[in-house]
Amino acid sequence: MTTNIDNVVLSTYSLVKTLMRFDIITIFPNFFKGFLSESLLARAQKNKLLRINVHNLRKWAKDPLRPESGASRHQTVDGKPFGGGVGMVLKVEPISKAVKAIRKKGKKAKVILFSPRGKQFDQKMVKRFSKLDQLVLISGRYEGVDERVAEYIADEVISVGDYVLSGGEVPSMVMIEAVSRLIPGVIGKKESAEKFDHPQYTRPEVFEIDHRKISVPKVLLSGNHKKIGEWRKNHSKV
C-alpha cells in the first residue's frame, strides 16, 4: 500500500519543508488500511504533507528450497530460535535487505525497532523525530526479532508502554500518529498540535447520573478567561 507524492511541498504555515516519510516494514500490510485511509492522516497524505508507505517484509524473503535464486515462493521470514523455545523469530536477513532498500541516503532518517525492552516513547522523542525526513519502522511479530536487528540495523529500540503486544503494528501507528501531529499543516490549529488534554465539558450544563445531578465546573461558565485558563492549566497533564 503506497501513496506517491512530490518531494517538496509548501505547508499551510508558508514554510518550505521536505516531506516527512514514514516507511513501515511488516508481514501484515493490510493491518494499516483503515488507519491510513481515515481522518487526519488521510487528509495529510492527500494534501501532500507527508508520505506513508507500507512494505511487506516477505518481498525480501528467500525461498528455502532455492536460496541461491533469491526467489520468494514460500516467503520465509522467520525461523526457530537457537537454544530452543516456543514460537518463531523474525530473521535478520530479510529485515536487513528491506532497510537497505527503503532507507533514503542523504536524508535525516532513523530506523526504529519496537520492543518491550526498548526506551520508553515520550513527547521528547516525538519532537526529535518530527524534525527528520524519514522514519523506517520495523514491526516485529511472533516471539520476537533476531537480536542482531536491534544491535546492528536499528538506530533506536523503542517501547510504547510497559506491556506486551502481539507485534509492532500498533506501536508503528502510535508513532506515526504522534509525530505527524507536529508536521506543519497536519493539525488544523497549530496550537493544538502538542496540547496535553485537560477535562472538557459541553451541553447540557447539568446531567443526571444514577439520580445524582452532575454539573459543569462553575469556573468554565464564569466567562473569566484568565480563571478558565488557570483551571485548565492546573487540570492538564504536563
Image: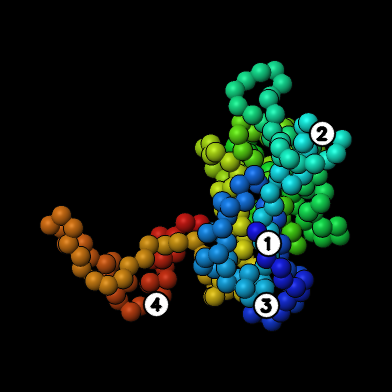
Residue type pointed to by label 1:
Thr
Residue receiving disc 3 = 11
Determine whether 233 is above or below 203 in the image: above
Residue type pointed to by label 4:
His
Observer-side mark, 4 or 3, equals 3
Residue receiving disc 1 = 2
Question: How is the rendered protein coloured?
Answer: rainbow
As measured in the structure, the alpha-carbon distance from the residue carrying label 4 to the one carrying label 1 is: 46 Å
Residue 130 in sight: no
- Whether label 4 touches label 1, CB < 8 Å: no
Residue type pointed to by label 2:
Arg
* Residue beneath the point at 53% across and 39% down: 165
- Mark 3 or mark 2: whose residue is earlier in sequence: 3
Position in image of residue 12 (x %, y %):
64, 80
As measured in the structure, the alpha-carbon distance from the residue carrying label 1 to the one carrying label 3 is: 22 Å
Alpha-carbon neighbours of circle 1 within 10 Å: few (<14), some, or many (≥20)? few
- Mark 1 or mark 3: whose residue is earlier in sequence: 1
* Residue beneath the point at 27% across and 70% down: 218
